[in-house]
Amino acid sequence: MPGMTGEKLAREISLINNKIPIIMCSGYSYRSNTLETEANNIKTLLMKPVEKEELAEIVAKILQSAKSTTP
């Protein structure tokens, strides 16, 4: 993403709607502290390459978690 990091994109998305769960995928060694991750609504950090089965499982868990916390 030219001109924007994934972390900045997550921050911008959270400003628009902080209920959107974010899965961050990176091909680089990624360092993030827990407070930044929670503040940016990043639910999971994955290192590329990601197997499609693993991604599907993570998406399903996050959606189920969101479904169970929605009133």
Image: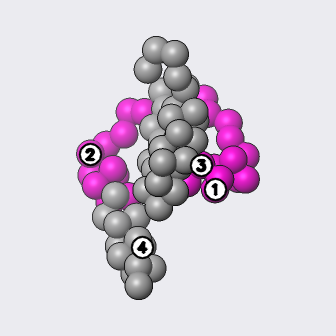
3 or 4: tag closer to the N-terminus: 3
The amino acid sitting under disc 4 is Ser
Q: Position of residue 65 (x, y in %)?
A: 42, 73
**Looking at the image, is mark 2 or mark 4 earlier in the sequence?**
2
- Measure the alpha-carbon separation of dots 3 and 2: 24 Å
Residue neighbourhood size for the residue with mark 2, other residues' Cα within 10 Å, grouped as few (<14), some (14–19), many (≥20): few
Span highlighted in magenta in the image: 29-58
Point out which mark residue 38 bears.
1
Residue 65 image label: 4
Which residue is located at x 48 percent, y 27 percent? 27
Q: Nearer the viewer, mark 2 or mark 4?
A: 4
Q: What's the amino acid at mark 1? A: Glu
Q: Does the magenta stretch include residue 39?
A: yes
Residue positioned most to the top: 2
The N terminus: image quadrant: top left
Image marks 1 and 3: residues in contact by CB distance under 8 Å: yes
Question: Residue 22, which numbered label?
Answer: none
Give the residue drawn at x 41%, y 79%. 70
User: In the rendered structure, which disc, 3 or 2, sits on the residue that comes first in sequence?
Assistant: 3
Which amino acid type is shown beneath numbered disc 2?
Answer: Lys
Element type at mark 2: helix
Q: Mark 3 points at which residue?
A: 40
Q: In which quarter of the image is the C terminus?
A: bottom left
Residue closest to the eye, 68 or 44: 68
Q: In the picture provided, is 35 more to the left or to the right than 60?
A: right
Whole-percent x, y for residue 38 in the image: 64, 56
Contact? badges 1 and 4 (CB < 8 Å): no
Secondary structure at badge 1 equals helix
Farthest residue to the front: give it: 16
Q: Residue 52 carries which label?
A: 2
Three-letter residue code for mark 3: Asn
